[in-house]
Amino acid sequence: MGEKKERAKKELNIAEVAAKRLSYRSRTSHELAKYLDDKGFDAELIKSTIEEFKEIGYLDDERFSRDYFRYAAAKGWAKARANRELKRKGVGAEVIESAYQTYLEEFGETDEETALSIAKKMITSDMLDERGRIIEKYKARVARRLFNYGYSTSTIYASINQAIAELSEE
């Protein structure tokens, strides 16, 4: 009888620790499992707690991923950067792709559109020379920002060129 009480106490303790961890912010199943493992809980107990939390809706990697794509878009990040971060957080490729498709259906802004928007905000007329071409140091600055946000080289330079063309038309 004492063994059952001890197990019940451990289960209650792990659930409290997990719920407290999730109360600060959403996490992936992998992140929570790693946290509980670092706290020294038994692997089988961690697995059952994770499954229970998934069943009751406390953990949902797809929902987390959809929210993360919204967060990444608000920061101006490309899909590639958001994908890397989600993979680092232990989310599987299929879940990430499904969440991205849902994000696109809801918001519809592609990487190319976002990169162009960022380039337009960064490039001003005083960055252009007398012939309407962007001065190299400014072009490099915009390119570095877009690269750090995870955009491909082709998207970066297409966005910069289009932003310059639109600025020149004004």
Image: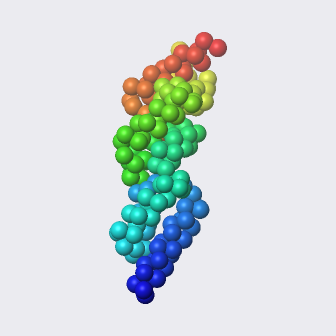
Residue reaching furthest to the top:
169
Residue reaching furthest to the bottom:
2
The residue shown at (39%, 25%) is 154
Which one is in front, 88 or 157?
88
Give residue 153's position: percent from left, percent from top: 38, 30
Q: How is the image coloured?
A: rainbow
Which one is in front, 26 or 88?
26
Q: Quadrant of residue 119?
A: top right
Give residue 134's position: percent from left, percent from top: 51, 23
Give residue 64's position: percent from left, percent from top: 51, 48
Instruction: Judge whether residue 144 can be spotted in this image.
Output: no
The residue shown at (54%, 21%) is 163
Q: Quadrant of residue 1?
A: bottom left
Give residue 78's position: percent from left, percent from top: 46, 36
Q: Quadrant of residue 79?
A: top left
The residue shown at (40%, 48%) is 91
